[in-house]
Amino acid sequence: ETVSGQEWVQFILSFSRAENPMYDKKGDACYVGQHGDAWYLAINFGGTSVRSCEVPEGVALVVTTGCFFCFPPYVTGEWEDCPSFMEDARTYWVEHSLTLDGVSYEPGYTISGPYKVWYPVNGLSKFFGGTNPPLKAGVYEPAMDGGYFGKIRGLEPGKHVLRIGALGEDGLS
């Protein structure tokens, strides 16, 4: 099931870099910040991660096989605004895959926004956009995201294997 990326992006951005689940090596903190009937699973910033996570019965998994997000201040020379960046990002991912227990899923590309996003102290700004100086904590708008997002529902209790892969036009995987 294809879903909006807004909640996934807001979840990922809500953590400082030190606590961000994208940097969790084994999945030990996959439960941090999770609540409700959907769990947001983190990808990484390139390379391979093998994580183990115990998910409560009855929740859906929300994942991305590749996404971009933006909010002002924009990186000079990179893009003029979020809508134009999201359109450029649509073609960035030349390959993406999502399988659960060997069954392929095909999330569609969605663009979400504009919306407000909360950015924490010591967030991810050094990674995306390399803003210098780093962004200050606060609410930023208009934020937008674009990517391949999916929601997987109805998992039976037991062990499952979820594989997420993506390849960007510049070789990022």
Image (tube, rainbow, N blue to C red):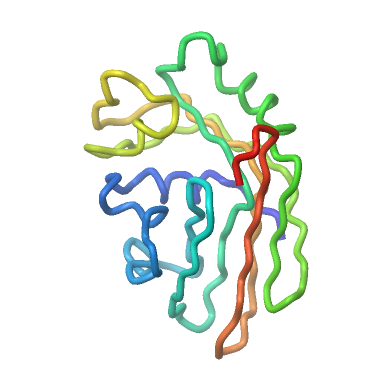
Say which of 132 and 38 sits in front. Answer: 132
Q: Name the one closer to the observer, 103 or 49.
A: 49
What number of labels is visible? 0
Where, by quadrant of the figure, is residue 152 drawn? bottom right
Q: Is residue 159 above or below residue 105?
A: below
Asked whether, in this view, residue 61 is left or right of residue 152, the answer is left
Quarter of the figure that contains the N terminus: bottom right
Query: Can you tell which quarter of the image residue 103 is in?
Result: bottom right
User: Residue at the location (56% across, 61% down)?
Assistant: 62
Q: Is residue 82 above or below residue 69?
A: above
Task: Indicate the position of residue 105 as horizontal and vertical percent values.
Answer: 75, 64
Residue 101 drawn above or below residue 166? below
Quadrant assignment, res 124: top left
Q: Position of residue 27 (x, y in %)?
A: 40, 69
Residue drawn at point x = 32 percent, y = 64 percent: 32
Query: Residue 115 at what x, y percent from top left?
Result: 48, 33
- Seen in the image, is 162 located left or right of residue 142? right
Residue at screen point 32% across, 36% down = 119
Residue 50 percent location from the top left of the image: 49, 68
